[in-house]
Image (cartoon, grey):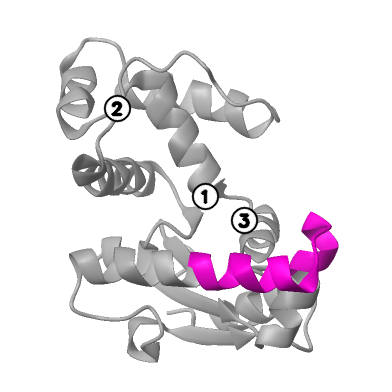
Amino acid sequence: MNKNEKFVITINREVGSGGRTVGSILAEKLGVKYCDKAVIEGLTQKFGLSPERIEEIKAQKKSWWNEINNYYQTLVSSASKPMDAEVVIDSEKMFETEKRILQELAVQESCVIAGRSGFMVFRQWPNHLNIFIQASMDHRIKRIMSRRNVTLEKAREIIEKVDTTREAYIKKYEDTTRYDTRNYDLVISMDVLSEEDAAELIIDYINRTNK
């Protein structure tokens, strides 16, 4: 990946591994935009986005990206979720909607994208880096217990449910598994790393492979 040109970094992660935090820290260190599930859901609710709606907005005289970007800036700086959804997107259209939003973001500027099946969306994208953040079950359980203030049993239940849901989501659209390391350029285990350490490791990798 050439960091001197427009790039996109995708971070897929296991729940409880700290991958989302790694992505946020990495984006801040690189001085680029960060996007995750909360941002996509917020944009979809605010603008009632669907593949058709995206094309309608882009066809209007007003700038598609400026409007989306202005709302994005408000969303990421606020803890509240938007309540003025125009439409409800059915599950069959959600993947295509998310894909279009993410690709539009990547066209406009360099960015770090956490989750949202990024490795699938940007597999053929020029100048990209796909990363997978993982951790042992024990590490994930302890982190979820601490961050969500739940019991060990509840933490394990959360992990099993999310793992199953995410894997099913991938298999619905691709003949692969998110655990196939061939989908990624870099795989990081968080058992002995802090989120800050992981972000620095990624930057070191980028610097060493920058071309």
Give the position of the C terminus as an image quadrant: bottom left
Query: Which numbered marker is on residue 22?
Result: none
Which residue is found at the position 67% from the left and 65% from the top?
A: 22
Closer to the eye: label 3 or 2: 2
The percent position of residue 18, horizontal first and vertical second, equals 68, 68
Q: Which residues are magenta?
A: 144-162
Query: Which numbered marker is on residue 49?
Result: 2
Give the dominant element type of the magenta stretch: helix, strand or loop. Answer: helix
| Front one among 99 and 149 | 149
The percent position of residue 7, horizontal first and vertical second, equals 42, 60
Q: Which residue is the site of mark 1? A: 36
Give amino acid for label 3. Ala
Give amino acid for label 1. Asp
State the separation of the CA atoms marked 3 and 1: 11 Å
State the separation of the CA atoms marked 3 and 2: 25 Å
The percent position of residue 117, horizontal first and vertical second, equals 37, 62
Which residue is found at the position 85% from the left and 64% from the top?
A: 146
Give amino acid for label 2. Leu
| Front one among 62 and 118 | 118
Which residue is found at the position 42% from the left and 73% from the top?
A: 129
Which residue is found at the position 78% from the left and 56% from the top?
A: 148
Mark 2 crowd level (few <14, some 14–19, many ≥20, 10 Å Cα) = many
Q: Which residue is the site of mark 3? A: 27
The disc, 3 or 2, on the residue closer to the chain's N-terminal end is: 3
